[in-house]
Image: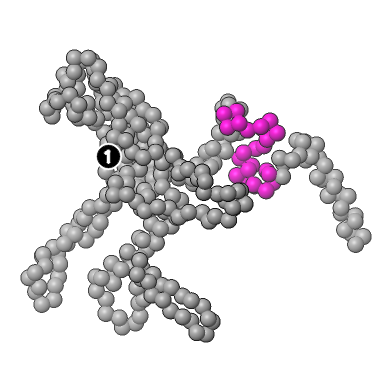
Amino acid sequence: MTTTHAHDGSTGLFCEYGTQKRTRYFHGMLLDDLDFITEQNYHLERQRKLNRYLWGTGVICGLDLVVGSGAQVQIQPGAAIDCNGELIEVERPITVDLSSECRKDCGCQAGDKPELCSDGEHSREFYLGLRYAECESDNVAAYLPGGDCDRPASQPSRIREGFCVEVLDDPTDPCALPSTSGRHKSVDDWCEVPVPCPTCCSEHHAVVLGRVEVRCGPDEAKQTYSNDRREYVLSAPLIRHLSAAMDDADIGEEIRRRLGISKSVEDLSWTSLLCNPLGAICELGSSGTEARDERPAKAEQAAPQASRA
């Protein structure tokens, strides 16, 4: 990135300025379309950077894959952030017909039914993902002073934001973290290492929703769905969702067992940990109600001492 360096002689500070600029308006300024484009680009890029650096990439909420009849899979409403920081929002259920994927491996023509493609059962496994997309819309007449003949008579006045559903053969596993073996000599050495910034996006950067296996047989196409390769944004709604599950009377104990949480913290309210982390953590070293009963007594003992002081 090209930067401008400057030395502030009054403070002795070294300053550096990036290429991103925001419009500075002033009274009497002559405006054209580039000024407004610069204004929009500035705020769009700032929002992308905030999403990318603060939240990361993955599914925020929803976007469940529901297996339908035949070779149809429905994507439920929800939201995600891609690795460029673009927000992808699915506002209504979207049905995707995967029968064409059944035909790919058996040489059928478009329009043939999946059951005609094979004498026996044929399986194909792939992943579904969402990719951010834009398109121009709402053409309006262009009023040009001087009659500029090089420009069209009308141009799109809006940009619609959306997404494309993509079929992915073998996406990178987002949960496969890079190995840190040999990079740190000790825990103290690791503590001095700053948090790494997110890497740049690859050319293909769809948000993976899950793995779908389509079994095309003589009767009809059938699918199974797995949450494999789905990555979540570590957002407040997700943490609340996990906390509620930890406290659930039916599944909380099994989740704690699978996580290897010791008996000493089984009495911890995970919902309280989210709402009041300090109070919940202080409970970890106590022995249940006895410790809770001791605190008011200690407070009563401390009150006369404070009044005497």
Residue at the spot 39% in from the left edge and 45% down from the top edge: 80
Can residue 252 be seen? no
Q: Position of residue 81 (x, y in %)?
A: 39, 48
For the N terminus, which image quadrant? bottom left
Q: Considering depth in this image, is 173 or 188 the residue closer to the camera?
A: 188
Check residue 273 for magenta coloring: yes
Q: Position of residue 187 (x, y in %)?
A: 61, 48
Q: Is residue 245 above or below residue 122?
A: below
Q: Is residue 59 left or right of residue 40?
A: right
Q: Residue 6 appears in which quarter of the rendering?
A: bottom left
Q: Residue furthest right?
A: 308
Q: Is residue 120 above or below residue 141?
A: above
What residue is pinned by disc 1? 166
Give the overall secondary structure of the magenta segment: helix
Residue at the spot 53% in from the left edge and 42% down from the top edge: 239
Check residue 163 for magenta coloring: no
Instruction: Inspect the image, locate mark 1, and give the three-letter code of the amino acid beneath it.
Output: Glu
Q: Position of residue 169 (x, y in %)?
A: 29, 34
Q: Position of residue 146 (x, y in %)?
A: 10, 77
Can residue 306 be seen? yes
Q: Is residue 68 left or right of residue 9?
A: left
Residue at the spot 41% in from the left edge and 47% down from the top edge: 57
Which color mode does the image show? one colour
Q: Considering depth in this image, is 84 or 163 the residue closer to the camera?
A: 84
Q: Secondary structure at mark 1?
A: strand
